[in-house]
Image: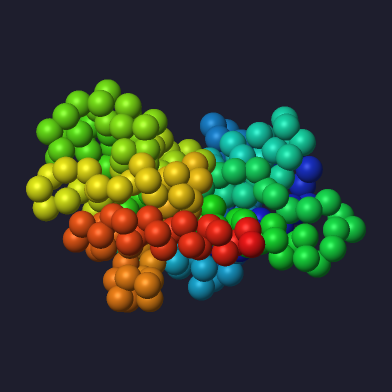
Amino acid sequence: MTQAREHVRSAPRKLAGADKAQAARNGTTGAFVHLHSGGDVTEVPVTKVRYGRIANKKAALSKVIAGYADTAAKAKRTGKVFVVTYAVSPNGKIEVVREAPSETPAAGGSPLDAALARAKGRGATKVAEILKGADMLTAQEFGALIGTTHTTVNAKRKGHEVLALQGATRGFRYPRWQITPEHLPLPGLAQLFEALGDQPWTVYRFLRAAHAELGGKTALDALKAGQVEAVVGVAANQTAGAFS
């Protein structure tokens, strides 16, 4: 739906009976959409084509409008610019993927600052998508697969014995793929954290990447094959190279 244009009226108005009939006729031609709150009505202009796309999507449209209203109020209250990212399914269902303060640089910032801000925004959206994956488990779900409690899982997370990822709005999520065929946590994670630093997302990327030093295998597959020393060595070499 296109962004609502500023209407000539300064405030919502009461719609009389004749006006309601005219609104219905105009609405079907795609002239505008009416937003009602009790007796108050305001008009949002849309094209005929876009009107047809949203005419039967009242629930989704209501969610977008409510989200906009809440975010606009939050932006006014805090004085910050907010970025809201929606995921729209083929059947029209909509879900908020991310809502966070914008990292857009102040006016007059350099093109590089603007590019970095856009990159950070894309990265945050990607993180949200990863954490929504079916293979991302809660501590309780993860614990059930390795035969322990969520309390023990949390303790293992703090000790870097298991990998847990965290985004802006969702709690810790534990990748299912770090469980071995024997239903045990991935071996060597504590050493890997020590080599790469206390950065779970760095460890995640390292595990999922293929490494020539490991014969083209991913670090994850190499650890599951018991090549802990080789994997930790590759990580240590990468870290040393980054700071040499």
Q: How many marks?
A: 0
Q: With respect to residue 173, does 204 lie above or below?
A: below
x and y, in percent, of residue 226 in the image: 21, 57
Q: Which residue is most to the left?
A: 182
x and y, in percent, of residue 1 in the image: 55, 62
Between 3 and 113, the one lying in front of the other is 113
Q: Look at the image and tell me in which quarter the C terminus lies.
A: bottom right
Between 100 and 178, the one lying in front of the other is 178
Residue 185 in sight in this render: yes
Residue 192 located left or right of residue 126:
left
x and y, in percent, of residue 201 in the image: 46, 50
Residue depicted at x 80% and y 67%: 111
Residue depicted at x 52% and y 68%: 50
Colour mode of the rendering: rainbow
Residue 217 located left or right of residue 158:
left
Residue depicted at x 57% and y 49%: 84
Residue depicted at x 66% and y 34%: 74
Q: Which residue is most to the top?
A: 151
Q: With respect to residue 5, does 169 lie above or below?
A: above
Between 160 and 168, the one lying in front of the other is 160
x and y, in percent, of residue 192 in the image: 39, 49
Residue 135 in sight in this render: no
Residue 86 located left or right of residue 14:
left
